[in-house]
Image: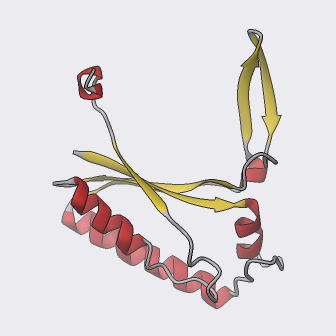
Amino acid sequence: MKYMILSYASQQDYDAMSGKETPRAVWTPEDLAAMSQFMETVNKELEESGELVETRGLAAPVHTRRVGARDGVPFVTDGPYAETQEVLAGYWVVECASFDRATEIAARLGQCPYPGNAYDDAYADIRPMIESSEDLGF
């Protein structure tokens, strides 16, 4: 079964990683190097085990567009959005034996180093991916 592991961040988090001072944290070049090394290690482990299908980080929310419709008329809103702080920051698609194994992988990703205790409340969502409408269970 394939699972998508979703990680979240805010525009403030992206700002902090780019070196801007924020109330949450300031990332040093050493912090960024540690995070990059951790991600490379975990991703390599998942590749070697055959479980990694795909992984990507996403650009900052400020580079986002939201498309919707009001009364049947399309509209576009540029990010970041006042109505939400956290947005999807990146994802992993893994193919593994069980939901429990996908949860183990997400927990391992949660061990990524970061400055101070600013991200102690970080979380990830794990969602099974459907392959066909039959998987919807209706």
Left or right: where 4 falls relative to 112 = left
Compared with residue 37, is residue 135 higher up or lower down, i.e. above or below?
Answer: above
How far from the left and from the top, in percent, is residue 28?
70, 87
Screen quadrant of the N terminus: top left
Compared with residue 34, is residue 73 higher up or lower down, i.e. above or below?
Answer: above
Compared with residue 73, is residue 123 higher up or lower down, i.e. above or below?
Answer: below
Q: Is residue 12 visible?
A: yes
User: How many numbered callouts?
Assistant: 0
User: Hey, which residue is sitting farthest left in the picture?
Assistant: 97
Screen quadrant of the C terminus: top left
Instruction: Give the residue displayed 73% in from the left and 18% down from the top.
Output: 69
How far from the left and from the top, in percent, is residue 102?
28, 59
Instruction: Give the residue displayed 37% in from the left and 65% down from the top.
Output: 106
Compared with residue 40, is residue 99 higher up or lower down, i.e. above or below?
Answer: above
Residue 12 position by quadrant? bottom right
Instruction: Give the residue displayed 33% in from the left and 71% down from the top.
Output: 44
Q: Is residue 57 visible?
A: no
How far from the left and from the top, in percent, is residue 131?
28, 31
Left or right: where 108 falls relative to 74 = left
**Which residue is nearer to you in this view: 83 or 17?**
83
User: Hey, which residue is sitting farthest top in the picture?
Assistant: 72
